[in-house]
Amino acid sequence: MEKSLKRMATMQRLQTTGLSLFYEKGYYNTSIDDILKRLSLSKGAFYYHFDSKEDYFIQIIENLVVRKIYGMLIEPIEGHEHTLDLITNCFENALETAVHNELDYGFVLNNFVNEFNGRNEHIMKHLNEVLKVWEVTLVSAIQRGKFNGHIDRHVDAEGVAIYLMSAFMGIRTLMVETAPSARKYRFMSQLRYYFKSLEPRATSQYDS
């Protein structure tokens, strides 16, 4: 039991440190030697835990990136309150965290998707699975909002989900090093304005 807990703690440390390094420098700009130096590991010790650099990165996606995206962008919108309020608060909190991040290199998932797209199909499969879960969660939340009468019944849930994902990833890129607080404020103002357009329209006797 003690050995198992110690191994789990070691893996957590190795993966957390690795995610920080890959986030900062990118996967292809990070060598095995960079990893060993940051982890204070010998090459033998590294390969005892991981089959390869790619295996190491995939374990980081599955254990840390998935958890990070779930906690930041998925779990907060799974409630049954007003859907648009949930998404607004979710984006507000996620962007506010970025504003106060002194070492902000952008949205971690977006950075990796851009880096691996067209270069590594195996890793892209794992990243796309994370994106798909986020998209499905947004679609479900919007559909729930339509059912509950918070969102107009004619709204294209899939279209809104894709738009919101694209908008979030875009603003996170624009916030890096350039007036993040001001850009966050303007983005959230426009998001609220957009959400107003999704609310149910006043019906008349001529509506079907």
Image (spheres, helix red, strand yellow):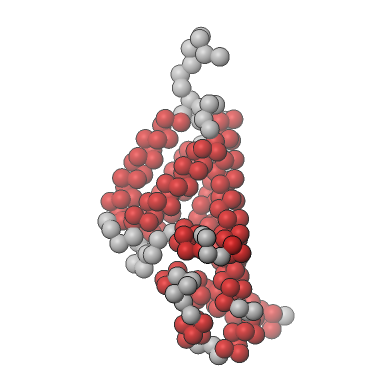
Relative height, residue 53 to residue 109 (above, below): below
Identity of the residue drawn at 50% across and 55% down: 72
Left or right of 177: which side holds 138?
Answer: right
- Quarter of the image for the C terminus: give it: top right
Q: Position of residue 165 (x, y in %)?
A: 48, 47
Q: Where is residue 203 in the image (x, y as percent from the top left)?
A: 48, 16
Relative height, residue 133 to residue 48 (above, below): above
Identity of the residue drawn at 52% across and 13% down: 207
Tell me which corner region of the image, top left, top right, bottom left or bottom right, holds residue 138.
top right
Tell me which corner region of the image, top left, top right, bottom left or bottom right, holds residue 60.
bottom right
- Direction right: furthest residue: 1
Relative height, residue 84 to residue 2 (above, below): above
- Asked if residue 111 shows in the view, the reply is yes
Identity of the residue drawn at 61% across and 59% down: 125
Left or right of 57: which side holds 105?
Answer: left
- Asked if residue 22 shows in the view, the reply is no
Q: Where is residue 37 in the image (x, y as percent from the top left)?
A: 47, 86
Q: Where is residue 200 in the image (x, y as percent from the top left)?
A: 48, 25
- Quarter of the image for the N terminus: give it: bottom right
